[in-house]
Image (tube, helix red, strand yellow):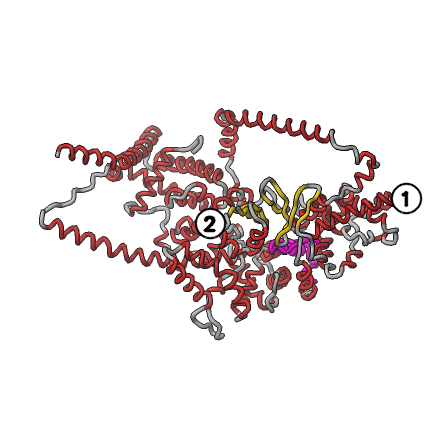
Amino acid sequence: MKEGFDKEIDSLLRRRARWTAAGSLADGDGNGAATPASAHLDADELGAFAEGALPAGARLAATTHLADCDRCRGVVVSLSRVLGGIESKQNASAAAPASAEAPRPASWRAWTAALFSPRALRYAVPLLAVSLVAVVSFVALRSRDAGSLPNTQSARPQTEVAQTRPDAGSAEKAMTANVNQSGVPGQPGETESGAATSVATRTEPPSVGRGPNAGEPQPAPVTSVAEDASAPPPAAAPPATSAGPEATTEIAKSAPKPVAVETAQPPAKSDGEDNNREKRARGAEPADEIASNEAAMQRRRAANEVQMPDGGARNQKRGADNSASRTYEEGNAAAGATQRESERDGRGGSFAARRRPNARAEQKTEGGETRAAAGHRFRREGSAWVDVNYKPSMRSTGVRRGTEAFRALVADVPVIGRVAEQIAGEVVVVVGGQAYRIR
Amino acid sequence: MPTDLEQLVREGARRLLARAGSVRSLDAEAVAPRVRATVEKYLLRHAPQSGAKEVGGFIDALHADELLLVVACERGDAAAWDDLVGQYRATLLSAARSASAGEAEAEELAGSVWAELYGLRERADGRPAGKLAYYSGCGSLGGWLRAVVGQLAVDRHRRTSRLVQTEEPSEFDRAAAESHEQDGWRPAPSLDPESALAESDASRTVEEALAGALGGLDAEDRLLVRLYYFDGLKLKEAGAVLGVHEATASRRLTRIHAEVRRRVEATLAGERRWTREEVARTLSEVAHAHTDADLRSMLAPEASAAVEKREELYE
């Protein structure tokens, strides 16, 4: 297997397993045959264990039982083969329980030593060299291509280019961050993106003023909105951090009435003041520049529209359940949970998308070809369509169309079936934080 | 256990309803008992000191739509039953097919599961006592249904195989005895060298030390050993059961080897008073005897085929 493998112990264990199976050896370390039926794990525990959904304490208890019970272990093995499949678990090491992943110091040393062993270096060094050459070539080619671009944009002032670049790509990233945000307040590493997301989402409607500046002329706010979305200033991050989940809640609350977004406060006062100053400075901008800004906003809105075709009905339901959701909205974590759940259902989307269910199905953006299916957006990556919410760190399950596993998966997650019907070829779709690669 | 558990559960049930796609005419009062039972079963039983944050987080991780669907079915909501059958019929049949030899058997198994889900007996309040009462929402409903099918299939298989095991050997023995009564032939005693070696004291001592070492491993390690050595799973499959990558399972197995060796050596040196050289030599001999036996068993068909060929030549 690898260095450090103990052949003698391996051989002894194999012999013991064979003799135990043959019944010629008393099984001193536990045998499922002796387990009383009442002590077996129930189907709920087995299913949750196979899906990795048990809390740490319950998982430990289930593991202890499974180590000694052939019957329950057999069910879990068959479940894990069907449910996650082997392929999905390859990416699951990061999500495995901490107790399972915590390496012992000795094995860490051995692992590190194995990394720098001649056997590993024999392959790693040439591989690194080839990778380096490839990266250098790529960078050189890219820089040459950039130098040979037509000079049309250079005719514009540099500031204008920077302001009018909040294309669908940036809005899309902000949207993705919003959807993927866990919603649990205080989680490190997520607050900043959450802040950026809340800024971008809140500034989407071009007709909406930014709090204190609502009375200003129309073109100027549009420009400032675009600027915010393209590059949220770092100074806005700390105050917006605390406002991030609240902003998400406000969006959910005001979804049936878009005008209510006007009441949403800007993430940081200093941010707003800076933008106001810039807006005033740009008050005399030429009309064509304003028009180009509006065009950029149109593109960004169109990109967001495709995210959620049936969000309107969900919002109506939210309005109907106002009494229940009001309490729910008071908790920040609960607001994040709503976002997660709506994404899991494949019905998640932006605020703008909820207002415009009849969005275009397919479009080409500046970042590449994208299309929408069953409430999900996909971008073209090679020969595959990849969900914009897909991250390499996600667990992914590979299924082939027409197989039994595919039918079972579609039965469990119907949105996958709809996606597979609408998009031919290889598709990666993200549902409930899990990626499915359909071939 | 948090002092305000009731309040936490009620709030959690409200959040559950709020994030569900369809509340199916259920309210927090209808869902709260189920949520509380789940919290107690999976969280508080194993970690009684869990705080409000843990309880809230656990409830928020439950499968809201699926739990509400099941609760609605239990309450006799016909539309919910239609949804359940419509959404999970294929899943159930697929699981039954995986656990059955043929299509007819699979359909019969699936039918049995549906009957158990609905409930053939009645509870005190007159409603059917179905298996749906045991779904907690902790895992997915599809996974739970597959587990129900798997359990039922395993139980059936065990019943069947027990019947086969108790009948077949006696039939075989009787037939063999009848056929050899006439010619007086008796089977020779087994001369398996591995079995002979197992009878030796040294081998038995090593076996006992090995059993003790395996029993001293922690649960995850014991499960991995079980899956890999006893159940014959590949590392990739064993890792999948444990939720880790194949490479992680491999590294863990290597560490387990080291730990088992350390424990075995400590037992032999401490309790049996063997010297370090004796321990090393005995372990090596026992392990190699096993390897030799494996090789002999692998070569045995070829050897016997060669003997048969030689006999044919002589004839």
Instruction: Classify residue B194 as left or right of residue A264.
Output: left
Q: Which residues are magenta?
A: A325-351
Residue at figure coordinates x 35%, y 42% from the top left: B211
Residue at the image point whose x is 9% and y is 47% from the top: B183
| Left or right side of A10 for A404 | right
Image side of residue A53 versus residue A18, left or right: right
Q: Give x and y (percent) for residue A239.
A: 76, 47
* Mark 2: few/some/many CA within 10 Å (<14, 14-19, 20+): many
List x then y, in percent, for residue A174. 70, 46
Residue B64 counted in the magenta span = no
In the image, taking residue A249 as reference, residue B252 lies left or right, namely left
Find residue B164 and report its image quarter: bottom left
Residue corresponding to mark 2: A80
Q: Nearer the viewer, residue A366 or B242?
A: A366
Q: Is residue A326 magenta?
A: yes
Q: Nearer the viewer, residue B163 or A44?
A: B163
Can residue A333 be seen here? The reply is: no
The circle drawn on residue A46 is none
**Chain that bears disc 1:** A
Give the farthest residue toward the right. A284
Chain hosting mark 2: A
Please tell me which of labels 1 and 2 falls first in the chain.
Answer: 2
Label 1 amino acid? Ala
Separation of disc 1 and disc 2 at Cα? Answer: 64 Å
Magenta stretch, main secondary structure class: helix
Which residue is pictured at 81% across the width and 54% down the height?
A: A208
**1 and 2 marks in contact (CB < 8 Å):** no
Give the image location of residue A204, x and y in percent: 76, 51
Looking at the rendered structure, the secondary structure element under dot 2 is helix
